[in-house]
Amino acid sequence: MPDVDPSLTDASVGLSSESLSPGRLAYRRFLTHRAAVLSVFVLALLILWVVLSPVTARYGVNEQVFDISKGPNQNLPPSRIAWFGTDIIGRDVYSRVLYGVRVSLIIGVFSAVFSLAIGAAVGAIAGLKGGKFDDIIMRVTDIFLAFPFLVALLVIRNMFGSISWITFFTGEVSSVRFMVFLFAIFGWMGVARVLRAQVLSLKEREFIEAARALGASDTRIILRHLLPNSIGPMLVSLSLGVVGAIVSEATLSLFGYGPDPGSGATSLGLLVAGSKSAVRAGYWWLALYPFAALLLITLCVSFIGDGLRDAFDPKHGGGR
Amino acid sequence: MSDALLRVEHLVKEFKVKAVTGIRAVDQVVHAVSDVSFEVGRGQTLGLVGESGSGKSTIGRCVLRLIEPTSGSVIYDNAELTTMGREDLRQLRRKMQIVFQDPYASLDPRLTVGSAIAEPLEIHKVKSDHAERVAELLTLVGLSADHASRFPHEFSGGQRQRIGIARALALQPNFLVLDEPVSALDVSIQAGVINLLQDLQKEMGLSYLFIAHDLSVVRHISDRIAVMYLGKIVEVADSEHLHEVPAHPYTEALLSAVPSPDPVVERQRHRIVLQGDVPSPINPPSGCRFRTRCPRAEALCAEQEPMLSEIAPGHQVACHFPDSTPVSLRGTGNVRR
Amino acid sequence: MEPVLSIRDLRVSFKTPAGIVQAVRGVNLDVAPGEVVGVVGESGSGKSVSFLSIMGLLPPSATVTGSATVVGTQMVGVSAQQVRSQRGKKIAMIFQDPLSALNPVHRIGAQIVEMIQAHQDMSKADAHARAVELLDIVGLPQPDVRANQYPHEFSGGMRQRVMIAMAIANDPDVLIADEPTTALDVTVQAQILEVIENVRQRLNTAVVFITHDLGVVARVADRVEVMYAGNTVERGLVNDMFATPHHPYTQGLLASLPSHNKERLKPILGSPPNMISPPSGCAFRPRCAHATDACASAPSDLVQVGSTQTACIRAVELAGGAK
């Protein structure tokens, strides 16, 4: 029988009195990052504002502030009727910004999530298998990276846009769904590289060797050991992906290649794009508010990404 | 002979590396393990000692096929491992396990202790109640069943090492590879873990391949010891006998270099200090690999590699000029060859 | 004779998110010229931190109080410049990992020359000649060739020799060796211990040898200081310390080592204490088989018992009577 060592069997072991999982520890570290925590609040409020749109929006997305028969309603500066002013058709800019935020967030989040799913799978498998497998996958990644994004977009839009079985899969070329599809297809490579690097460094750690020695299959090692220990880089990639998608959408819209969801629906990018000529005429509110919303969202997501990265930093991860 | 639980024959492991010389990248070969053969008896402990570059850790992993051997055979309980299919190998993994050196890296930081120990039970779909078995194992290694819900970072090095041992024992193996299991622990904690390993061996009839560089620990726990140098076994003997009659000059130098906690003995000892460094395993010396640092080397040593041969029952040496005088009589000028 | 290193009531604490870690809690030490003092302890004993603090090598989150004089010059509580001026000149340090102390993009010779020129007025040519001489003293073959090589061209043992050469470049009075052989193979360790002994004899440098390996202490030390949880718990001449230790921790350490007979080992039960809130009185109390209530308020002063000085208040009692 082993020496009876009371200090070993003492159930209240450890420096802390509560059992903290590494996830919990990271959460605590995140809370010390003031900018990130503030950003979480702001973003949460923003999302709440969007979710409660039946209440928070003052008008419909395509609705005129008041009928033109009652007087001129175009390009009115901010007032009590329209907090952010009206646009060229007389619609409330405030409400349109709200709907625009909704669309942009949808594009951002869904693109990032799909990119992450594809990229994490590709990167983890490449990193774990290694050898020729790894080489082939990384060359495919490089090809995708080298592919000119805009050219691909135009090609797909113009050449395949009318083919029904393609659009069944990807959505109409002018739809939000198509945007998400596009960003996901061209956004997973960065995530794949990050995950592959993470897996390569984890692979040599003894607890992975231990899992192999116990007879674990590759799938189990990836799902049970590698991915859970890569949550940090994955969350960071997610936040970068959201920012990237939202900004890309805005950029595309500026050049006229963005989504056109029809019936007046809009995104932040479309709002900014549509304000180009109006600003020259002096109607500054048409550009300021959408742009400010864009800035706010990207700043918040970036700060959260920073906070997450510091919280999961391997140097502080899980003890000694 | 075939009663041995584990037989390793002519094991070779070579790694390919690229080296840059001038403007070309040249493929080079690291001869980590070169034609190594040994046996581990049932219920016995074979200590494998060596310094950096000896290949001892590589052997530990090759025996379990965590690293694929380049050639040679590993026979466990009369079954050949090197040619086994994936499924048979997985089954065999239940019988052969490993405990690693670094208590801080060998446990997944995100899994609770209980999950880590239960993992082998999950992988092999063991029918019994896992929670019960985990509690049983924790008590077996001297910890408390309540520790199962806690995380590795809450434990000390010695405790984590015990958790690693509990995990290795979950499937009731017969054979454990122990890769420097106490080297990373404080001296006063090492003793507890060594005692545990010995107790478990007696209770469960385990066989150990104990890989270490700390000779005093190896001497204490091993029945037989194999000394490695640059990928080759240079001497094998019973633990005590090796210390009394270290026939190979490297063994002698190794034993003489180990400081013993007795100042009186230390100041009086006849010390052999080897010159130079261990050669690179990429370009080992011709003939006997130890000859570049050997005080007894002669021309023959460069031309012909000495093979392991028996100089006394159970005592094998790979040397052209082994010394079979007891070490207590050495330094008197009488060398018995 | 004046001690070359004199430490009084040295205390070091660190501010960490979890609280204030009291790493060193009142260490006193005198090192005579040319003597070798072995400082033994395990993790958390404070053995390395004590000497890093004297050298001014701790991060800003550390608070150091007390006194440490090197040949009369104070090193604690003085300006960083003062510490730097003595570091490398009167007192030098070598570490466990020589690779981190050497700059990989500079040649070895140049790094030693830099060390020399920082404290001595010498031309580059003279300094280089001296560097080659130093490499020879530490036993490097072909020192003139080696001086022009880069760190990555050296093995672990050779790098450690280089670090020793750099440390003795200005003929210091005290050399602090912080686990210099822990990361080396045992045969290389034997070589390095020989080098340190040669250097000591030749230059009459005092050596403070920090280690956890009792065998190494038995080999090299004249005197031994045993540290536990930030304090010295026992000190004595090396022969006395190993023959008749009086502190239960020292006794426990020696008893836990494998001996030639294959007797069951006797571990020290428990683990090192939490240095944020160490136990009151004697910190070894929770792990000591002989602890009594009085130990909770035991002072940490050393008292002569037999041939050693120990902080255990029951030492006399335990030595005389049955254990």
Image: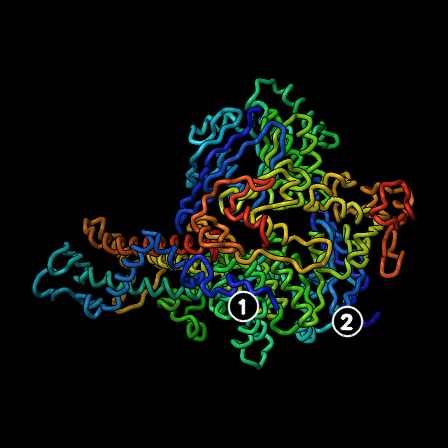
Residue type marked 2: Glu
Residue type marked 1: Ala
Q: Which of marks 1 and 2 is nearer the N terminus?
A: 2
Residue A151 in view here: no
For image coordinates 46% across by 36% down, the residue present is C9
Name the side, left or right, on which C158 lies relative to C310: right
The residue closer to the viewer here, B263 or B273, is B263
B164 relative to C148, above or below: below
State the image coordinates of residue A150 (x, y, percent, origin top left): 43, 57
Residue B14 in view here: yes
The residue closer to the viewer here, C237 or B8, is C237
State the image coordinates of residue B178 (x, y, percent, origin top left): 67, 61
Label 2: how many residues lie within 10 Å, few (<14), some (14-19) or many (20+)? few
Using the image, tell me which numbered label, if any, was put on residue B80. 2
C138 relative to B126, above or below: above
State the image coordinates of residue B316 (x, y, percent, origin top left): 85, 57
Residue lying furthest front in this view? C321
Q: Mark 1 points at which residue?
A: B116
Answer with the quarter of the image where residue B46 lies.
bottom right
B266 relative to C114, above or below: below
Name the side, left or right, on which B283 lies relative to A200: right
For image coordinates 64% across by 30% down, the residue present is C165
- Between the C-alphas of marks 1 and 2, the distance is 30 Å
